[in-house]
Image: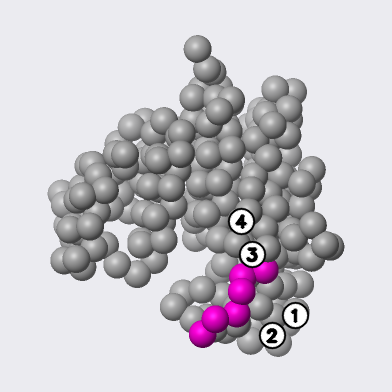
Amino acid sequence: MKEKITVIKVGGKIVEEGASLAALLDRFAAIEGRKVLIHGGGRSATRIAEQLGIESKMVDGRRITDGETLKVVTMVYGGLVNKNIVAGLQARGVNALGLTGADCNIIKAHKRPVKSIDYGFVGDVECADGDMLSRLIEQGITPIVAPLTHDGKGNILNTNADTMAAETAKALAPIYDTTLIYCFELPGVMRNQEDADSLITTITCESYKQLLADGTISGGMIPKMENAFNAINNGVSKVIITKADAIEGTNGTHIIA
């Protein structure tokens, strides 16, 4: 029987504010067994870029990563945000190790091809190395992964953290009984974000198509859902979308294969 592991992806807003970060780290530290945390940090990158006089350009919520912006996101994601999380977890007794995809070659990607939009130094994941991650994990290390990958040719790439979480969970699934949790500010996928009682507790492939068609799921939730189905259809045991204060349990929206 496989041992259990929990892969958690947390949005940037939660890890960038003192009170919400502290609460998240308390809950993450309380999760029993093996675990991995993958985080964002976009708001901090935008703020520091502005302080440096570098304009942040976004298209449909996605960052255009030119050469100067790449320096900022590498500094912020792999440094400031990542190491704040690592230090906070060490204080809570979790032996955390901050990583990017380039470290130990754990996540390799290629530069996104230019189609209608040139996103610059943005990576599309090719593979994650579950064996290497498991070797770290079996040494009692908890990986804390920043949303950066590399292309094997010396280039760092800004990479979507939801995708990195799905690919990491998929890579660990042959080794562990893997649960993937996407956590953010809402209790899960909602029919009405203003109505706390409108949580959708389960979503299947068929119900997802209907929720897309009627506009219940739209915008940034679409790629999150696509990553969730990618994971659940490729060996991950459970995928849950939930609020950051519920990561220790099973509340939220369950994605069903």
In the rendered image, residue 62 lying in the magenta stretch gets the answer no
Q: Which residue is at the far right? A: 154
The residue positioned 50% from the left and 12% from the top of the image is 1
Badge 1 or badge 2: first in the primary sequence: 2
Q: CA distance from mark 4 to mark 3?
A: 6 Å
> Could you tell me the amino acid type at mark 2?
Ile
Q: Nearer the viewer, residue 229 or 84?
A: 229
Q: Is residue 158 visible?
A: no
Q: CA distance from mark 4 to mark 1?
A: 22 Å
> Could you tell me the amino acid type at mark 1?
Glu
Badge 4 or badge 1: first in the primary sequence: 1
Badge 3 or badge 2: first in the primary sequence: 2
Badge 4 or badge 2: first in the primary sequence: 2
Residue 15 x/y as whole percent = 55, 54
Badge 2 marks a residue whose secondary structure is loop
Badge 1 marks a residue whose secondary structure is helix
Residue 123 x/y as whole percent = 64, 64
Magenta highlight range: 111-116
